[in-house]
Image (tube, grey):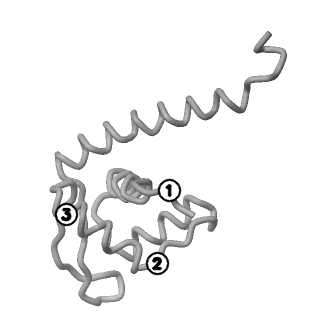
Amino acid sequence: MVLQGTLALMVLKTLDVLGPLHGYGIVRRIEQISGGLLNVNQGTLYPVLLKLEQEGSIASEWGASENNRKARYYRLTRAGRKQLDAETREWEQHAAVIARFFTVKAEDLK
């Protein structure tokens, strides 16, 4: 399960780290980083890519894949880098709040 919005964040971070990639490369990297715990299919990925492109966070162009097939390559834009920075800060804040709940013990509340 992937929380809403987190797949877009994973796509942006993947493109930030690895540079331009085709959809299959993005999926493989997300699955690799998650240790196989996340399985992203094309029906889930491509609407996210389309939305990010419409927002101007990523841009795309056609090119040849590793096995000489036509593939659409996505890259992070300047706006996408700003979005990634903002969403990373927001995600880290949310994660820190949730982490507090796991560290509180009953005796801490007295």
Near mark 3 (Cα within 10 A), the count class, few <14, some 14-19 or many ≥20, is some
Mark 1 residue type: Leu
Mark 3 residue type: Glu
Instruction: Find residue 47 and report its image quarter.
Output: bottom left
Instruction: Say which residue appears at 45% left-offset and 39% top-offset.
Output: 91
Q: Which residue is mark 2?
A: 41
Q: Which residue is mark 3?
A: 53
Q: Nearer the viewer, mark 1 or mark 2?
A: 1
Q: Nearer the viewer, mark 1 or mark 3?
A: 1
Label 2 element class: loop
Between disc 1 and disc 3, whose residue precedes? Answer: 1
Q: Could you say where residue 109 lies in the image, as x and y percent from the top left?
A: 76, 14
Indicate which disc residue 74 carries. Answer: none
Indicate which disc residue 3 carries. Answer: 1
Mark 2 residue type: Asn
- Return the residue nearer the eye: 52 or 110: 110
Between disc 1 and disc 2, whose residue precedes? Answer: 1
Near mark 1 (Cα within 10 A), the count class, few <14, some 14-19 or many ≥20, is few
- Return the residue nearer the eye: 63 or 109: 109
Q: Could you say where residue 59 lies in the image, as x and y percent from the top left?
A: 17, 63
Residue 83, placed above or below residue 9: above
Task: Please identify the quadrant where the C terminus is shown.
Answer: top right
Label 1 element class: loop
Residue 96, placed above or below residue 42: above
Instruction: Say which residue appears at 71% left-offset and 32% top-offset.
Output: 102
